[in-house]
Amino acid sequence: MKTRRLGTKGPAVSAVGLGCMSMSQAYGTRNDEESKKTLQRALDLGVTFLDTADVYGEGHNESLVGEAIQGRRREVFLATKCGILFGERGRGLDGSPAHIRQACEASLKRLGTDVIDLYYLHRKDPKTPIEESVAALVALVKEGKVRHIGLSEVAPATLKRAHAVHRITAVQSEYSLWFREPEEGILPACRELGVGFVPFSPLGRGFLAGASVQRDTLAEGDMRLGLPRFQGENLKRNERLRAALAELAGAKGLSLPQLALAWVMAQGAEVVPIPGTKRVRYLEENAAAADAALTPADLAAIEAALAANPPSGERYSPDMMAWVDRG
Ligand SMILES: NC(=O)c1ccc[n+]([C@@H]2O[C@H](COP(=O)([O-])OP(=O)(O)OC[C@H]3O[C@@H](n4cnc5c(N)ncnc54)[C@H](OP(=O)(O)O)[C@@H]3O)[C@@H](O)[C@H]2O)c1
C-alpha cells in the first residue's frame, strides 16, 4: 500500500484509509464477525489508517475496532472523534474542555489503547470558542494521550483560528465526485496551512459505489432514507450521473468506487480518503484504488460527465445541516 503524508509536516498514513462507521450504524445491518475480518484484512493489505468516532453505534464502533486491532496496535494509525453527544445526554454538540477530556478517557478505554494517533473534534460546538476546544486537545497531546489534532467539517475561518493555537494535522470533511463544496473553501485553506485533508463519504455514502440504494432496498433505519439526494426526482437524476461515471470507469478498467477514489486522490497529494465498508470484498476493491492513476484526459471526461449531469439535492437533511460550521 502506498502512503501519503497528512499535510506538509504531518505523519505518513496509508494512501487509502478505512472508515469504520458502517460497521456499527447508518447503512444496513451490523455484522461484527465480518467487520472484524474486514479490519484484519485491512491491516494485512497495509490499509492502516482507521477512522472511527465515539458516537458511531454509541461506542460500539470503538469497542469493535479496539477488539479487532488487539495485538496489532502498532501497525495502526488510529483516528477517532469526540464532540457529538450520545446516550444519556441526548443528541447535541459539546466541545467544552470538560467533555473533551472525559470523552478521550472513554475512547481510550473502548479502543484498548493508551494513545490516539489523530483525535478530531467531530463538529465545532457553537457554544464553545474553538480556541478553548483546541486548548483541551493540546492538553491531551501534552499528556501523551493524543498524538495529532484534527477537526471535522469546519469552516476555513474556524480552521485558521484553531491552527493559530496549535498545529492542526488534518481536517475531515465530506468530499466526493458528487459533493465538491470543499474546493471553494476548506480544501484551499488546508493547502495554505499545510494541513492534511481527509474526505469522508468519498463514495457518496455508497451511491458512487454501485451498491443498491433504491429506497425499497434500504433497510429500515438506514440513514440514507432521510437524505435528499436519495429521494424521488433527485435520485432519478443522480442515477444518470452514476451511469455516466460508471461508463467512464468501465472504459478505464476500473470499478465505479475505484474511479471515485482515484478522483479524490487526484485532487492533491495531501488528500487521503477513508471509504467506509464492513465487507472484505469491498475493502479489497477500494484498497486497489491506491494504484489507479487518472490522466488529464480522464479528469476532463469526468468534469464533462459532471457538467452534463449535475448532482441533485442537498447532501444533508435540514437538522444535520444545522450542525455544519459556517465560520
Ligand atoms: N466526520 C464526519 O462527520 C463523518 C461523516 C460520515 C462519515 N465519516 C467517516 O467516513 C467514512 C466513510 O464515509 P461513509 O461510510 O459515510 O460513506 P462512503 O465511504 O462514501 O460509502 C460507504 C458505503 O459504500 C458501500 N461501499 C463501500 N465500498 C464499496 C464497494 N467497493 N462497492 C460497493 N459498495 C461499497 C458501503 O457498504 P457496506 O457498509 O455494506 O460495506 C457503505 O454503504 C465513515 O466510515 C466514517 O468513518 C465521517
Image: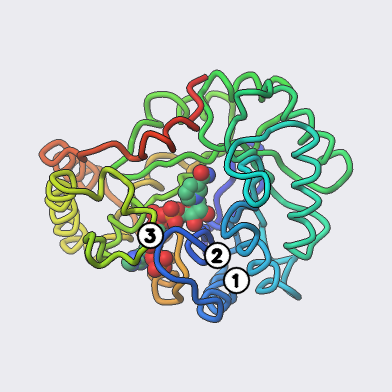
> At numbered mark 1, what does the secondary structure look like: helix, strand or loop?
helix
Which of the two discs, 2 and 3, labels the residue nearer the N terminus? 2
- The residue under label 2 is 47
Query: What residue appears at the point 62 percent right and 49 percent down from the top-left corner?
Result: 86
> At numbered mark 3, what does the secondary structure look like: helix, strand or loop?
loop
157 left or right of 62 in image:
left
Q: Which mark is residue 43?
A: 1
Residue 90 rendering spot, x and y as whole percentages? 61, 45
Q: CA distance from mark 2 to mark 1?
A: 5 Å
Which of the two discs, 1 and 3, labels the residue nearer the N terminus? 1
- The residue under label 3 is 222
- Label 1 sits on what residue type? Leu
Q: CA distance from mark 2 to mark 3?
A: 26 Å
Q: Nearer the viewer, mark 1 or mark 3?
A: 3
Residue 55 rendering spot, x and y as whole percentages? 60, 52
- Label 3 sits on what residue type? Asp
| Nearer-the-camera pick, 276 or 321 | 321
User: Mark 2: is the Cβ under 8 angstroms from ligand 1?
Assistant: no
210 left or right of 101 in image:
left
